[in-house]
Image (spheres, grey):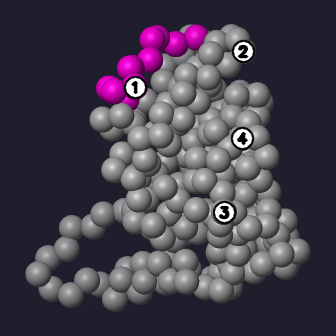
């Protein structure tokens, strides 16, 4: 619940909702907003109030002093570092969260982190980092140059996974990938399969996002 609510707020800030870099539902770094079929009457107050609160998390004043990504190209953001800084910031305020298996997410470790107060602290920790999102380009928020860099990195990850013993079919061409950007080497079928236990090592060995290869 903690990760879901915080992720919803963080990812709706730009209007762009994406999925975890690894595509692993057990290590979701971002998630799609839930959809509800509503009749002609007013939405139920409880669900509506909860969603309004979730969306309000993005407007909370950020806790500064842990880093500032405002001048970093969205493609170059090191999501490992972002997650580490959020965990550090929250832990410094006695909110017990820890890194997720893929290194880009965080999760609660005690029931008290489910409180709204705790979740708001984590949201403020994230807001204070000023993490940018790709929103202005015509290709899923990317410019053509950014999209090319992401695709080229996917090719690198595919080769890296092969060197680690996980091979997969030929990737789509750049032009085909650009249509929906759905191909991700971590989400593709591999031989052998990538299991949850492989993820912590593989995501560090073959970072699923360009910023993981630099200082971000």
Instruction: Give SS at disc 1.
Output: helix
Residue to which mark 3 is pinned: 71
Depth check: 46 or 68 in front? 68
Instruction: Give SS at disc 2.
Output: loop
Where is residue 35 drawn, in percent x and y?
Answer: 30, 63
Residue to which mark 2 is pinned: 164
The main secondary structure of the magenta stretch is: loop
Q: CA distance from mark 4 to mark 3?
A: 17 Å
Looking at the rendered image, the disc whose residue lies closer to the viewer, 1 or 4, is 1
Q: Earlier in the sequence, mark 1 or mark 4?
A: 1
Q: Is residue 93 left or right of residue 143?
A: right
Badges 3 and 2: C-beta atoms under 8 Å apart? no
Where is residue 127 drawn, in percent x and y?
Answer: 65, 74
Residue to which mark 4 is pinned: 212
Residue to which mark 1 is pinned: 174
Looking at the rendered image, the disc whose residue lies closer to the viewer, 3 or 1, is 3
Looking at the rendered image, the disc whose residue lies closer to the viewer, 1 or 2, is 1
**Number of residues whose C-alpha sits closer than 10 Å to that of mark 1, classed few (under 14), some (14–19) or many (20 or more):** few
């Amino acid at each position: 619940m903690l990760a879901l609510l915080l992720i919803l707020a963080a990812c709706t800030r730009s209007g762009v909702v994406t999925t975890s870099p690894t595509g692993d539902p057990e290590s979701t770094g971002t998630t799609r907003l839930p959809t509800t079929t509503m009749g002609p009457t007013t939405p139920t107050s409880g669900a509506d109030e909860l969603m309004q609160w979730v969306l309000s998390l993005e407007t909370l004043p950020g806790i500064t002093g842990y880093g500032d990504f405002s001048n970093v190209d969205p493609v170059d953001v090191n999501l490992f570092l972002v997650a580490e800084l959020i965990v550090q910031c929250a832990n410094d305020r006695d909110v017990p969260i820890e890194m997720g298996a893929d290194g880009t997410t965080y999760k609660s470790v005690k029931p008290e982190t489910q409180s709204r107060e705790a979740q708001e602290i984590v949201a403020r920790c994230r807001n204070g980092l000023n993490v940018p999102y790709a929103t202005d380009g015509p290709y899923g928020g990317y410019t053509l140059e950014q999209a090319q860099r992401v695709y080229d990195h996917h090719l690198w990850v595919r080769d890296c996974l092969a060197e680690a013993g996980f091979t997969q079919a030929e990737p789509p061409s750049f032009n085909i990938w650009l249509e929906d950007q759905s191909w991700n080497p971590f989400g593709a079928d591999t031989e052998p399969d990538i299991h949850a236990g492989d993820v912590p090592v593989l995501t560090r060995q073959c970072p699923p996002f360009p910023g993981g290869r630099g200082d971000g």
